[in-house]
Image (cartoon, helix red, strand yellow):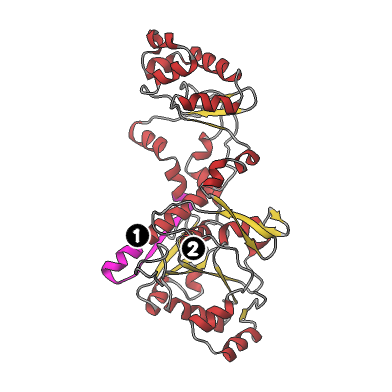
Amino acid sequence: MTSENGQLKTPLEGIRVLDLGRYQAGPRCALMFARMGAEVIKIEALAGDESRANGPRVRGQSAYWVQYNSGKKSLAINLRTDEGKEVLRDLVKVSDILLQNFRPGTIDVMGFGYEKIKALNPKIIMINVSAYGQYGPNRDKVGFDPIGQAMGGLMSLTGYGDLPPIKTYFPLIDRITALHACIGALAALREREISGEGQALEVCLADTGFTTNEIPISAYLGGGVETTRPDTAIGGGGTPFGGMYETADGHVILAAGNDNMWPRVCEALGRLEWLDDPRFADRDTRTENVDALEAGISDWLKQRNTKQAVEDLSEHSIPCAPVNSTEQAAHEPQLHEREIMMEVPDPVAGTMWVSGKSIKFSRTPMVVGSAPTVGQHTRELLSDLLGYTDEKVQALVDGEVVSCDDSN
């Protein structure tokens, strides 16, 4: 459990998580626990989790499945059987966290609501993830990531001009909800050290959607201020040096609108005369005269390729970055040198790239592993963790209560 000097080898070594999550928000939370060294047991159906079939695919392997389940153990079990439920009850007794993102009420019908699992293990922490929450006006509705983007107002501000509302391509709401769940569970683990008791917590996609738009909502509720999207995708959208601009071969993004950066911008663009121009004396006057400034920076950037523009601006400590395509992002040195994506062995594809070390600890490592095959760890968990005899395990296999992949 610990290294020779008595320290934990990983931040969450000794913590066991039962992952009943599906799709993204739940499994992504459990993934963070796996990366920090917890033992995460993926509870999936006998034929495997349905997201194993999701694209895109790499040499026959689902990139979707691998991203959210690498580093976990797979226990394939039929929870519609009494015997399968008994196995899960035994696992609850020896685990720290149970995560689920079924529709509200479903886990209670299954017999694993918080009061039931608390009776089995008073120290258990239960993470409930849902679309609209375990209570509230929309509790019984179903939903996925886009409902958070839409309901919270984010989609209305994404894009520009008169375009219809636009959702982000990647599941922003799922990812942030997963982090909320992980943070909450870590806090519950800390509180358990003091009280000796577990507790239930819940997060939902709709709530996360409101948090992504919290500043515009605050401005409206507090003073009736309505935030609007920019008129155009190019330029600062009414604020100089705070948006996307064209270069000779692509685009860059700038975030240099404050007064402290203004002299550096003038120096980088070779426009020191702007420092003495009363039209550009402060942020407000620069915003009023934004067209004159936008013309100057646009002309300067269009004479340079993206790489050169970023280098020249960065030399003056101006926040900027290339607007990369997926291909360009995949070749960024930052991605590889900091091990944000890492290549791991895979039983189907040979190797797969998975999300890597998003957190860097000074003493303890992040743990990046491979995605399991269906039931890869069933026999190990039932025998070694629960102490079932070989005969009992085989009887469960024969009765189609669990399935095992004994090829690994």
Identify the amino acid type marked 1. Ala
Whether 199 is among the magenta residues is yes
In the displayed structure, does residue 35 sit left or right of residue 185?
right
Q: Position of residue 245 (x, y in %)?
A: 56, 24
* Secondary element type, mark 2: helix
Label 1 neighbour load within 10 Å: few <14, some 14-19, many 20+: few
* Between 178 and 80, the one nearer to me in the picture: 178
User: What residue is disc 2 on?
Assistant: 34
Look at mark 1 in the image and give the residue it sits on. 187
Image x and y of residue 246, in percent: 60, 24
The answer, for residue 62, to whether it is visible in the render is yes
Front-most of residues 391 and 120: 391
The secondary element bearing badge 1 is classed as helix
Q: Depth check: 82 or 141 in front?
A: 82
Residue 327: image quadrant is top right
Residue 71 picture location, percent across and down: 54, 64
- In the picture, which quadrant includes the N terminus? bottom left
- Identify the mark nearer the N-term, 1 or 2: 2
Residue range highlighted in magenta: 188-207
Residue 398 figure quarter: bottom right
Circle 2: is it few (<14), some (14-19), or many (20+) Cα within 10 Å? many
| In magenta stretch: residue 168 | no
Residue depicted at 42% across the width and 79% down the height: 93
Residue 80 seen in render:
no
Is 292 placed left or right of 47 in the picture?
A: left
